[in-house]
Image (spheres, rainbow, N blue to C red):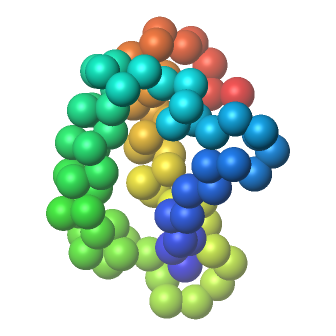
Amino acid sequence: MRGVDVQQLGMFAYVSVEECVPKDHPIRKLRILVDTILAQLDNLLSSRYAEGGRPSIPPERILRASLLQVIYSVRSER
């Protein structure tokens, strides 16, 4: 079962992520592009998951995290 991609921006922080990233930072443009591409892949991703069972980590979240890992040269998935 495919999990739902809900972004909790302020769960444990008193300052939002939006306030920490400058308005002209390139990562903002990249986020818009990635969100657009993932929206187009929604039907394909949904077709790969079973109807029942325990919800998984949303593939969109995993793909966004992997992309950030590549951009910022993080060597571990932890």
Residue closer to the observer: 31 or 3: 31
Q: Residue at x 32, y 39 (%)?
A: 31
Screen quadrant of the N terminus: bottom right
Residue 70 quadrant? top left
Residue 15 quadrant? top right
Q: Is residue 11 left or right of residue 45?
A: right
Q: Is residue 7 left or right of residue 47?
A: right
Q: Is residue 38 visible?
A: yes
Query: In the rendering, at what x and y percent does residue 28 appear?
Result: 33, 32
Q: Residue at x 50, y 46 (%)?
A: 62
Q: Residue at x 46, y 13 (%)?
A: 72
Q: Residue at x 39, y 17 (%)?
A: 71
Residue 31 versus residue 50 in the image, above or below: above
Residue closer to the observer: 72 or 15: 15
Total marks in image: 0
Residue closer to the observer: 28 or 64: 28
Screen quadrant of the C terminus: top right
Residue 65 versus residue 39 in the image, above or below: above
Residue 59 versus residue 21 in the image, above or below: below
Q: Is residue 4 left or right of residue 38?
A: right
Looking at this view, name the residue that lies furthest to the bottom. Answer: 52
Residue closer to the observer: 70 or 7: 7
Query: In the rendering, at what x and y percent does residue 57 appear?
Result: 59, 59
Query: In the rendering, at what x and y percent does residue 68 appear?
Result: 45, 26
Residue 52 quadrant? bottom right
